[in-house]
Image (spheres, rainbow, N blue to C red):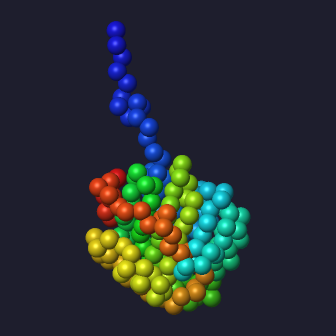
Amino acid sequence: MTIALPLRSRLRVSPFRGRLDDYLVSLARGDLLGAARAHFAPDIRLFDNGALAAEGLEGVLRKLQPVARRFAMLRGTIDGLVCDRAGETAEFSCRFDGVEIDGRVFRETVSVRQRWHLGRIIEEEQWRGLAAFAHTSAQAPAHALAGRHASAAPGSGLPASRPSAAACSALGPSACGQGAAA
């Protein structure tokens, strides 16, 4: 008697897409610290508009804590998601809308490029302000540009990053567009 196992159990299933979806849900909820704790590797490298902003999970959390304390409410809207399962890379923009503790309304769009390994983000590059617009216009594939835009003034405190050759992998046929289940 032969027992057939389901196909999924016989294949190596990468945790990348499921973990990416969990990360994006955390951003949409405005939970920057929770997203970092759950999804950043211990040796994460975080870049802000081209400069190294923090290295290591503890350094990233130290950078994010004042940002998180600044808001009474923060939500994110994800747009232009493009991911490559085989290369474990993702690119997207996130528009953050919030209310600061002093009552001021906040809006900023951040363009993000990530490299993942074994279900964790090992490098996150972020661009905001004019750098987000320039990155989106020059770097992203045309189909990823739909709905992307730059907004608020740079330097608002959300972390960002720099382009690297390793993170600029060409998106092949395994790329998935916004809203597509990869």
- Residue plotted at (45% across, 81% down): 132
Residue farthest to the front, as pictured: 165
**Residue 163 placement, left or right of 142:** right
- Residue plotted at (47% across, 71% down): 112
Residue 35 appears in the rendering = no
On the image, the x and y values in percent for residue 55 come to: 67, 67
- Residue plotted at (37% across, 24% down): 5
**Residue 31 placement, left or right of 57:** left
**In the depicted structure, whether residue 23 falls above or below residue 3:** below
Give the number of callouts.
0
- Residue plotted at (58% across, 87% down): 155
Residue 171 appears in the rendering = yes
On the image, the x and y values in percent for residue 140 come to: 36, 73
On the image, the x and y values in percent for residue 67 come to: 63, 77
Identify the image quadrant of residue 3: top left
Identify the image quadrant of residue 45: bottom right
- Seen from the viewer's position, the closer of residues 69 and 152 is 152
**In the depicted structure, whether residue 94 falls above or below residue 103:** above
Image quarter hosting the N terminus:
top left
**Residue 31 placement, left or right of 66:** left
On the image, the x and y values in percent for residue 151 come to: 44, 87
